């Protein structure tokens, strides 16, 4: 892996020591590259970042899954972003399609998470209005950190009871059956989860963008073309005016670009 932006002396050294393709970065180097902003006058907690992958022609999935357009380096970044987060926010459809499992503890990050006041692994926070979820899955019955389910005040009481019986914590984040994205983010912050990561899917990311609560996007650009009618990384209604984000870093490995954009 090599750094393409911002250009610094370290950028030149990385390229020189690893040749044209660079070298494989350690987990510590990746963690430093993707560190959350430190609390301060310019940061308003919580901080929500998205992590998505897209092909050159804009597909966020192939045959309903993101794995075919990913790569080992993308999965290393995926793991590091999880290891840095307090909670991972994910849509119900992605849980169903991707076969989500509980986040696991990683020995390489144990000391850093303890020093940051974090638990052994991030909590998974599932956004679902209908609560149409299989609560017998390990995500709900045997997570290392209790799984959260974000839903609306009008959710079906029987489904709420089923979620709680399975061991999940139900968090109300909206009136009616729907979930308000802004309220969901702040509800998680009230539980102590201020370093937030969303892995989609496209519908959820679109809702977060429309609500103007996304602070950062980590986008992997896959050097592949798929054609077809696959979803983009964000779906749903368009915003009134396009949101402007600023490129803060770009890494490269094996033709994949690992970009990081922050709100202007």
Image (spheres, rainbow, N blue to C red):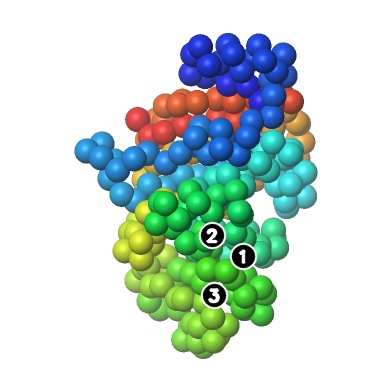
Image quadrant containing the C terminus:
top left
Image quadrant containing the N terminus:
top right
The image quarter in which residue 228 lies: top right
The residue that mark 1 highlights is 102
Nearer-the-camera pick, 205 or 239? 205
User: Is there CB contact under 8 Å for labels 3 and 1?
Assistant: no
Q: Nearer the viewer, mark 1 or mark 2?
A: 2
* Among numbered discs 2 and 3, the one appearing first in the sequence: 2
* Among numbered discs 1 and 2, the one appearing first in the sequence: 1
Q: Residues within 10 Å of mark 3 (few under 14, many from 20)?
A: many
Q: Is residue 153 above or below residue 97?
A: below
Nearer-the-camera pick, 203 or 43? 43
Nearer-the-camera pick, 99 or 224? 99
> In the rendered image, is residue 189 in sight?
yes
The residue that mark 2 highlights is 121
Q: Total number of numbered labels?
A: 3
Q: Nearer the viewer, mark 2 or mark 3?
A: 2
Q: Is residue 10 above or below residue 112?
A: above
The residue that mark 3 highlights is 131
Cα–Cα gap, marks 3 and 1: 18 Å
> Mark number for residue 49?
none
Return the x and y of residue 178 as percentages of the image width and height: 43, 68
Return the x and y of residue 256 as percentages of the image width and height: 68, 28
Identify the residue at horizontal 66%, vertical 64% (top origin): 101
Q: Residue furthest left?
A: 41
Identify the residue at horizontal 74%, vertical 25% (top origin): 254
Return the x and y of residue 238 as percentages of the image width and height: 46, 43
Q: Is residue 264 above or below residue 94?
A: above
């Amino acid at each position: 892996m090599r750094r393409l932006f911002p250009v610094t002396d370290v950028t030149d050294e990385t390229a020189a020591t690893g040749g044209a393709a660079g070298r494989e970065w350690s987990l510590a180097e990746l963690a430093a590259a993707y560190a959350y902003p430190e609390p301060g006058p310019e940061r308003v907690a919580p901080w929500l970042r998205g992590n998505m992958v897209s092909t050159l022609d804009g597909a966020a999935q192939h045959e309903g899954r993101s794995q075919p357009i990913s790569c080992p380096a993308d999965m290393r970044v995926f793991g590091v972003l999880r290891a840095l987060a307090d909670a991972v926010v994910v849509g119900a459809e992605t849980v169903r399609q991707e076969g989500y499992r509980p986040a696991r503890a990683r020995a390489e990050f144990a000391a850093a998470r303890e020093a940051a006041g974090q638990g052994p692994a991030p909590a998974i926070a599932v956004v679902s209005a209908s609560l149409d979820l299989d609560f017998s899955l390990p995500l709900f019955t045997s997570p290392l950190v209790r799984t959260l389910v974000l839903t609306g005040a009008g959710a079906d009481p029987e489904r709420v009871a089923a979620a709680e019986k399975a061991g999940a914590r139900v968090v109300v984040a909206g009136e009616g059956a729907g979930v308000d994205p802004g309220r969901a983010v702040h509800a998680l912050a009230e539980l102590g989860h201020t370093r937030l990561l969303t892995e989609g899917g496209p519908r959820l990311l679109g809702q977060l963008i429309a609500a103007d609560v996304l602070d950062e996007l980590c986008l992997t650009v896959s050097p592949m073309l798929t054609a077809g009618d696959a979803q983009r990384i964000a779906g749903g209604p368009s915003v009134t005016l396009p949101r402007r984000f600023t490129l803060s870093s770009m890494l490269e490995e094996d033709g994949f670009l690992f970009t990081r954009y922050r709100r202007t």
